[in-house]
Amino acid sequence: MARYTGASCRLCRREGEKLFLKGERCYTNKCAVARRGYAPGQHGQNRKKLSEYGIQLREKQKARRYYGVLESQFRKYFEMAVRKKGVTGVNLLQLLELRLDNVIYRLGLATSRPEARQLVRHGHFMVNGSRVDIPSYITKLGDKITVAEKSKSSPKIKSILENTSGKVIPKWLEFDADNLTGKIVALPSREDIDLPLKENLIVELYSK
């Protein structure tokens, strides 16, 4: 399966803000955006003012990179959002939030979305009692996500839980820290999604 394999920090610098792709590193003075807050490349410090199309494109790219989604996948999510009832932009963000890798991250079972994707691919999680190793799996209201029994004693999982112990869990999720079990108790509303995204610009871009 195709995926981005370049430097994560380069993506943050291109968007001019932290996308929190490196977990704990993003909160330290090692963060590339804090050290070099301009776009990568030899002309990074001399970027011209963006056109209307450029602004819309950057917003779409930023959303893609937050969630680690390729262009073809993102387009499919947009088409799904259009077909659903409600506001298209909000529907799009809701679909992205319900991806299994994002839910794992939101539950504090990974320090970043890229780490969550890796853990899901390695089979560390179960949905409604069945092992799921597809990061893009769209969870549903009422789904129960658990850490696989063999993975509960994993040093990796224990280390993650130590690092995320104070993390605030979104209100659309419930998490049982004793049993390492999460549940989707509501669909995420726009107010629940704390990312600085202007989804209306993405809708305008795809509507051209």
Image (spheres, rainbow, N blue to C red):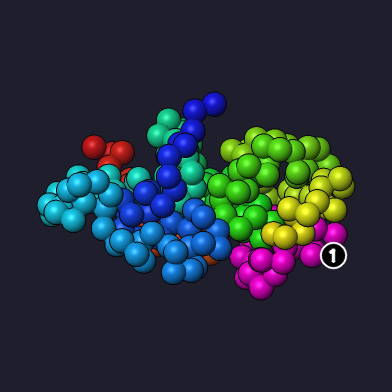
In the figure, is residue 151 to the left or right of 32?
A: right
* Quarter of the view holding residue 79: top left
How crowded is the residue under tag 1: few (<14 C-alpha within 10 Å), some, or many (20+)?
Answer: few
Q: Is residue 40 above or below residue 107?
A: above
Q: Position of residue 167 (x, y in %)?
A: 63, 69
Q: Nearer the viewer, residue 51 or 158?
A: 158
Residue 120 forms part of the magenta stretch: no
Image quarter of the N terminus: top right
* Quarter of the view holding residue 122: top right
Q: Position of residue 118 (x, y in %)?
A: 63, 42
Q: Position of residue 73 (x, y in %)?
A: 47, 33
Q: Is residue 158 above or below residue 86?
A: below
Residue lying farthest bottom?
166
Question: Residue at horizontal 18%, vertical 56%?
Answer: 45
- What is the span of residues highlighted in magenta in the rendered image? 161-189
> What secondary structure is the magenta-colored segment mainly?
loop
Q: Nearer the viewer, residue 187 or 39?
A: 39
In the figure, is residue 201 to the left or right of 1?
A: left
Q: Nearer the viewer, residue 10 or 20?
A: 10
Three-letter code for the amino acid on which mark 1 is drawn:
Asp
What residue is disc 1 on?
178
Question: Residue at horizontal 26%, vertical 53%?
Answer: 39
In the figure, is residue 14 to the left or right of 75?
A: left
Question: Residue at horizontal 48%, vertical 58%?
Answer: 20
Q: Position of residue 71 (x, y in %)?
A: 40, 34
Q: Nearer the viewer, residue 53 or 27?
A: 27
Residue 164 forms part of the magenta stretch: yes
Q: Is residue 56 visible?
A: no
Secondary structure found at label 1: loop
